[in-house]
Image: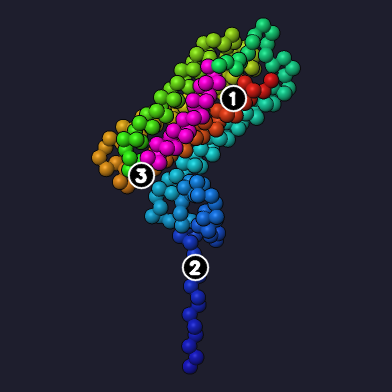
Amino acid sequence: MTRLKPAPVQKTHEDESPINLERIRQSLPQWLQRFLPSGGGFHHDSHGQAMFGFTIFLVSESLIFVSFFVTYILLRNSITNWVPPGVKGPQLSTGLIIATVVLLSSSFVIYFAERSLHRGNLARFRILWLTTSAMGLFFLLNTAKEWADNDFSLTTGLMGGTYYILTGFHGLHVTAGILLQGLMLARSFRANNYRGGSFGVSAVTLFWHFVDVIWIVVFSLIYLWR
């Protein structure tokens, strides 16, 4: 009697996807791999799954900003006198340039803060983390000063409305980033808080990079586009 050979077991991924997501992840740059779950979404990679979910959240936030940017560009191209008569409009001041440099530089500071945490240097992490918050607060204070010095308001045509929506919405994200940094700083004083991982710090760091990139676009549209 001829024995029938058992059918070969078909290998499947734990995420039940026909695509080998892990192979795709490994082909990406190392800095990008940290935002994707390993093993195609294995249940044991909770940090990777959480970071991937947070990345999706930032993508949705990006779409909101993109809609604002597209609206701004279309309105500005369709209106001849974008700045109403008798109004100077947004001005590129020395204080604004300094605040922009400070905000963008804070991305490097928070990057080294996260690296210090991964190396187990809590003291250095706290100093750099707190420095990042201070740099963000400096940017917010300068934004408030710019608003106070403006010779236009939210109701000064489409120019005024779009200006305050873009800078205000970005300012809300900077404020949220500072509050999240404060929360992570407070948690760093809990014993063995990062023994199981540091997703919170990684997520806040990514959020802060996002805030800085968005400001580059806002700054270019409002102050550099003449």
Residue 157 visible within the image: yes
Q: Which numbered disc flags the more N-terminal residue, 3 or 2?
A: 2
- Amino acid type at mark 2: Lys
Tell me the magenta residue range: 95-116
In primary-sequence order, the first of circles 1 and 2 is: 2
Number of numbered discs overlaid on the protein picture: 3
Q: Is mark 1 on a helix, strand or loop?
A: helix
Q: Is residue 147 left or right of residue 202?
A: right
Amino acid, disc 3: Arg
Q: Dot 1: within a 10 Å radius of its alpha carbon, few (fewer than 14), some, or many (20 or more) residues?
A: some
Mark 3 lies on residue: 119
Label 3 sits on a secondary structure element that is: loop
Mark toward the viewer: 3 or 2 = 3
Q: Residue 44's image quarter?
A: bottom left
Residue furthest out toward the top: 86
Q: Mark 2 points at which residue?
A: 11
Q: Nearer the viewer, mark 3 or mark 1?
A: 3
Which residue corresponds to the image point at 46% horizontal and 57% vertical from the top-left? 39
What's the mark number on residue 136?
A: none
Q: Can you identify the residue that label 1 sits on?
A: 219
Indicate whether residue 94 is drawn in magenta. Answer: no
Q: Where is residue 85 in the image (x, y as percent from the top left)?
A: 69, 8
